[in-house]
Image (spheres, helix red, strand yellow):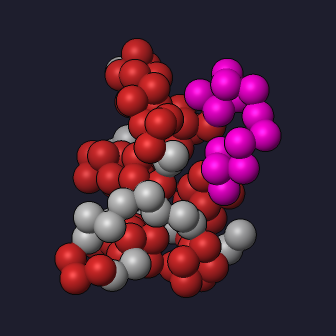
Amino acid sequence: QSFKEVGAGGLRGRSASNVEGGNPAKDYVRRMQQVHKLASGTIEAFAALLKTYQSKRQHPRTRDAQVLAIYNLLKGFPDLVKDFYQFLPEEDRAGAREVVAAEC
């Protein structure tokens, strides 16, 4: 999945927390590109990891490793780390935060 697909809504955001009902995935990718100036390869790696995570075909430890890989991609950008949880299933968010907290 390319970052263009992500920006077009390829990621499934589980929250409508952004202003005026916009697309959370598009807004997130826009922030990655325009505010933080992340390389397209980083954005594509993020999208691929998150897409695989969302597929729910992995063992929980594999999913934890994917959360950590996403964290490691974004750890220099606290706002992106905080906001990436919106793309996880609601029932996985607390566990993902715990995995990241244990790493810190």
What predominant SS class does the magenta segment belong to? helix
Residue drawn 72% across the image and 50% down it: 55
Residue drawn 60% across the image and 61% down it: 47
Is residue 88 or residue 71 the one in the foreground?
88
Is residue 91 or residue 5 the one in the foreground?
91
Task: Find the magenta span and give its range.
Answer: 51-64
> Residue extending furthest front?
91
Residue drawn 63% across the image and 79% down it: 5
Q: Is residue 92 above or below residue 89?
A: above
Q: Position of residue 38 (x, y in %)?
A: 44, 66
Residue 90 located left or right of residue 51:
left
In magenta stretch: residue 63: yes
Q: Position of residue 75 (x, y in %)?
A: 38, 41
Residue drawn 46% across the image and 62% down it: 13
Residue 58 falls in image quadrant: top right
In magenta stretch: residue 99: no
Q: Is residue 13 above or below residue 49?
A: below
Residue 47 located left or right of residue 87:
right
Q: Position of residue 78 (x, y in %)?
A: 27, 46
Can residue 63 be seen in the rendering of this structure? yes
Q: Position of residue 30 (x, y in %)?
A: 39, 77
Residue 1 falls in image quadrant: bottom right
Residue 56 falls in image quadrant: top right
Q: Quadrant of the C terminus?
A: top left
Residue 57 located left or right of residue 80:
right
Can residue 52 be seen in the rendering of this structure? no
> Residue extending furthest right?
57
